[in-house]
Amino acid sequence: MDRKIPFTLDRREKKILGVCSGLGRTTRIDPTFIRIAWVAVPLLTFVSVWQALVAYLICGIIGTVQRGRVAKRDGRSEFERMEDAGGGRHSVHDLRTKLDANDRRMMAVDHHLHSQNDELAREIEALRKEETK
């Protein structure tokens, strides 16, 4: 089911106020593209930098007001909503399935370095005894 996400400021991925990351979450577009567009539009069109700054501040005010409305409508306290903030990986299985190939290789190297290898230790001891003879 595709729920409509209201525009609010996004505190987790914000750079200044969270306007671009909030717009990105609302429109399901990468916030980086929105940030680039926000800078490029005044440079490539007749919109002045001041107008873009005012528009950014207006969006920030609207996002703040909307965030308050969503919080009141939710009816839960800030503490109760902290559970939703994690939202990501909850188990070791989830963590391992979401890793890329490089992360998996690093985990294998780390496991190899930190695991006890009795056979290798016996071989090293045998070589040491041969050297002392």
Image: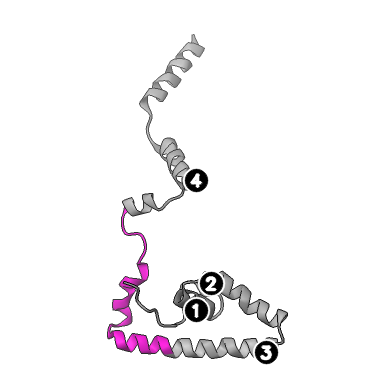
Magenta span: 66-92
**Mark 2 or 4, which is nearer the eye?**
2
| Secondary structure type for disc 1 | helix
Left or right position of 70 against 15: left
* Category of crowding for the residue at label 3, using alpha-carbon neighbours closer than 10 angstroms: few (below 14), some (14–19), many (at least 20): few
Model colouring: one colour
Q: What residue sits right under mark 1 in the picture? A: 23
Q: Are marks 2 and 1 in contact (CB under 8 Å)?
A: yes
Camera-side residue of 13 and 51:
51
Residue 8 horizontal/vertical position (percent) = 44, 82
Tell me if residue 110 is in the magenta stretch: no
Q: Looking at the picture, which amino acid does disc 2 mark? A: Pro
Q: Are marks 4 and 1 in contact (CB under 8 Å)?
A: no
Q: CA distance from mark 4 to mark 3?
A: 44 Å
Mark closer to the chain start, 2 or 1: 1
Q: What residue sits right under mark 4 in the picture? A: 102
Residue 114 horizontal/vertical position (percent) = 41, 38
* Category of crowding for the residue at label 4, using alpha-carbon neighbours closer than 10 angstroms: few (below 14), some (14–19), many (at least 20): few
Q: Looking at the picture, which amino acid does disc 3 mark? A: Trp
The quarter holding residue 89 reads bottom left
Q: Which mark is residue 31?
A: 2
* Category of crowding for the residue at label 1, using alpha-carbon neighbours closer than 10 angstroms: few (below 14), some (14–19), many (at least 20): many
Residue 113 to residue 97: above or below: above
Residue 64 horizontal/vertical position (percent) = 45, 87
Mark closer to the chain start, 4 or 3: 3
Residue 109 horizontal/vertical position (percent) = 46, 39
| Secondary structure type for disc 4 | helix
